[in-house]
Image (tube, rainbow, N blue to C red):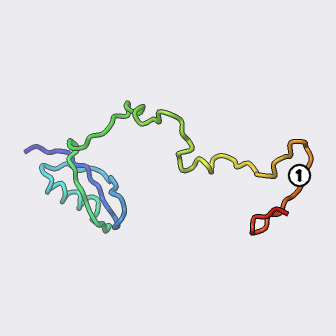
Amino acid sequence: MSNQVFEVFVILKRGDPATHVGSVVAPDPVLALHEAKETYVRRTACVSLWVVPRSAITAFAPEDEILFQAAFTRDYRQAGYFTRHERQPVGPAPEPDGQSGETLAVSRGGAVS
């Protein structure tokens, strides 16, 4: 049986995502798991250790980068959009004739005084 390359993923704590830590070469998944344990988590505690044959992983090539670009610019849908743009101060609206308007007080009953 020939050796194959296995990619190694580790979950350090419950709730954490799996993190790629490296790869090992082994003839089968069981030996790859033992090799990964000795190589990557011998001195650190982990919750889970995964080995995946490299041939089982499907990924886009770096040349396919255009597939991940947004079709339209919709910055407002990004989480950081509103913090990147300066907020304009909001003040009283100017009166159409250039003079300040009369202030109206509205009571709780809805009557204007």
Q: Position of residue 14 (x, y in %)?
A: 34, 67
Name the quarter where the C terminus is drawn: bottom right
Q: Nearer the viewer, residue 111 or 30?
A: 111
Secondary element under disc 1, as helix, strand or loop, is loop
Residue positioned 12% across, 49% down in the render: 27
Q: Position of residue 87 (x, y in %)?
A: 70, 49
Residue positioned 73% across, 48% down in the render: 88
Q: Which residue is mark 1?
A: 101
Task: Classify residue 105 as left or right of residue 99.
Answer: left
Residue positioned 17% across, 44% down in the render: 4
Task: Classify residue 98 as left or right of residue 43.
Answer: right
Label 1 amino acid?
Answer: Gly
Task: Classify residue 86 as left or right of residue 68.
Answer: right
Q: Nearer the viewer, residue 112 or 4?
A: 112
Vertically, is 14 above or below 39? below
Q: Nearer the viewer, residue 84 or 73?
A: 73
Name the quarter where the N terminus is drawn: top left
Vertically, is 72 above or below 97? above
Vertically, is 109 above or below 88? below
Residue positioned 79% across, 67% down in the render: 107
Quadrant of the rendered image containing residue 30: bottom left
Q: Nearer the viewer, residue 1 or 107?
A: 107
